[in-house]
Image: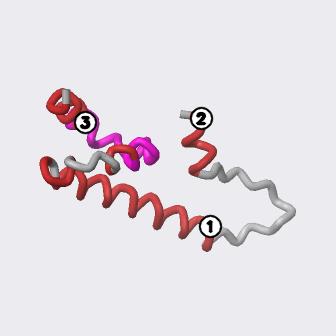
């Protein structure tokens, strides 16, 4: 079953950043670091990139308070999935 899951992940690695919560769950698989270190490294880079882009958008948002905000938080997106 582990091999099946590994092969399935390989099929959509380029889309993993669309599911950050799923990426966090994958990283909780303890023996994955030993068997697939390249996958773990890739997912960690994805999550770091998502995190840095969120902090930049929060810190760099200079819109005035009378303008409506259309920002959707990651938490809201993750709960919808």
Q: Secondary structure at mark 2?
A: helix
Q: Which residue is mark 3?
A: 9
Return the residue at label 2.
Answer: 80
Span colored in magenta: 10-24
Nearest the eye: 2 or 19: 2
Distance Cα–Cα, label 1 vs label 3: 31 Å
Looking at the image, which is closer to me, 65 or 39? 39
Indicate whether residue 14 is drawn in magenta: yes
Going by the image, does 57 lie left or right of 15? right
**Residue located 24% across and 53% down the image:** 40
Indicate whether 9 appears above or below 72. Answer: above
Task: State the image quarter where residue 22 is shown.
Answer: top left
Q: Helix, strand or loop at disc 1?
A: helix
Extreme right residue here? 66
Q: Is residue 24 left or right of residue 12?
A: right
* Majority SS type along the magenta span: helix
Whole-number angstrom distance, CA of label 3 to CA of label 2: 21 Å
* Of pointers 1 and 2, the one earlier in the residue sequence: 1
**Circle count:** 3
- Specify the farthest residue to the front: 30
Q: Nearer the viewer, mark 1 or mark 3?
A: 3
Q: Is residue 21 above or below residue 57?
A: above
Per the image, the residue denoted by label 1 is 58
Q: Earlier in the sequence, mark 3 or mark 2?
A: 3
Q: Residue visible at 54% across and 68% down?
A: 55
Q: Position of residue 1 (x, y in %)?
A: 19, 26
């Amino acid at each position: 079953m582990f091999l099946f899951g590994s092969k399935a992940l390989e099929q959509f690695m380029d889309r993993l950043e669309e599911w950050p919560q799923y990426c966090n769950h994958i990283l909780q698989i303890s023996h994955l670091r030993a068997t697939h270190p390249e996958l773990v490294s890739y997912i960690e880079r994805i999550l770091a990139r998502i995190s840095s882009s969120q902090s930049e958008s929060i810190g760099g948002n200079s819109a005035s308070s009378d303008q409506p905000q259309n920002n959707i938080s990651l938490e809201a997106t993750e709960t919808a999935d």
